[in-house]
Amino acid sequence: MKKTLFIKKGALLGASLLALGTVTALPVAAQEDASETTSESTSTESVDEESTDEATANFLATEGSDVQLALVTAIELFQAEFPDVDIVELDIDLKKNGSFEIQIDGQDAANEFEVTIDSQTNDIKSQEQDRLDDDDVKMALDFEQLLSIDEITSIALDDVGFGEVTDWNLEYDRDHDRFEWELEVFDQVTKDEAELTIEGLTGEILESELDD
């Protein structure tokens, strides 16, 4: 009888251990699922961050055409001079000597700023500061989402098929609730001119007008 009881107790102990092993295995599997979910979530967040960084890098890219590099340098000069001021408008003019005159408008809670920079010398030619009226408040330019000046230039020239861009302007259009690039194109040989308005986020051509 004693031997038989020992066997039964051993069997019960083995069954208990087996059950315990099954129970402890469940949390491990759950942890693996949770780990995979967390990994997938982290991966998605990383992709989103990379996409945002790439968009910002496009607008402020330090490689590209002369106007791209001149604009980025001018923005850096402005931000160094006024680190807490939002940039609300950009205006770039191509000069006869091939350099650019870049006007940057900025605003903070109380003031508005206008700075003009010569790309040939990378110097601030002039700057003005005035009190900001409520009616003059503008939306800050979103460099994380906007297409770069090189991308907008390519879209414009592909559309008109001639010349070069001589003037670029970018600001938020409150009436239409969108960022707009306005460009002027001129052909030195034919003297043809064109004016275009392009949506700043999508590159959609909103208006294209040719002047013979």
Image (spheres, rainbow, N blue to C red):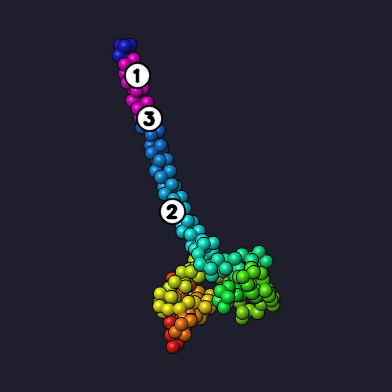
Could you say which disc has been placed on residue 9 in the image? 1
Give the percent coordinates (x, y) of residue 144: 51, 64
Could you say which disc has been placed on residue 98 in the image? none
Range of residues picked out in magenta: 6-21
Q: Residue at x 42, y 40 (%)?
A: 31
Q: Which one is in front, 28 or 139? A: 139
Give the percent coordinates (x, y) of residue 210: 43, 85
The magenta stretch spans residue 113: no
Q: Nearer the viewer, mark 3 or mark 1?
A: 3
Query: SS at mark 1?
Result: helix
How far apart, in angstroms, are the residues tagged by discs 2 and 1?
53 Å
Q: Nearer the viewer, mark 3 or mark 2?
A: 2
Name the amino acid type tagged 2.
Thr
At label 1, counting other C-alpha atoms closer than 10 Å, the crowd grade (few under 14, some 14-19, many 20 or more) is: few
Q: Is residue 196 left or right of residue 5?
A: right
Give the percent coordinates (x, y) of residue 94: 55, 76
Q: Is residue 99 left or right of residue 110?
A: left
At label 2, counting other C-alpha atoms closer than 10 Å, the crowd grade (few under 14, some 14-19, many 20 or more) is: few
The magenta stretch spans residue 11: yes
Give the residue pinned by disc 3. 21
Name the amino acid type tagged 3.
Gly
Q: Nearer the viewer, mark 2 or mark 1?
A: 2
Q: Is residue 14 above or below residue 139?
A: above
Q: Residue at x 43, y 47 (%)?
A: 39
Q: Residue at x 40, y 33 (%)?
A: 24
Name the amino acid type tagged 1.
Lys
Q: Is residue 179 above or below residue 62?
A: below
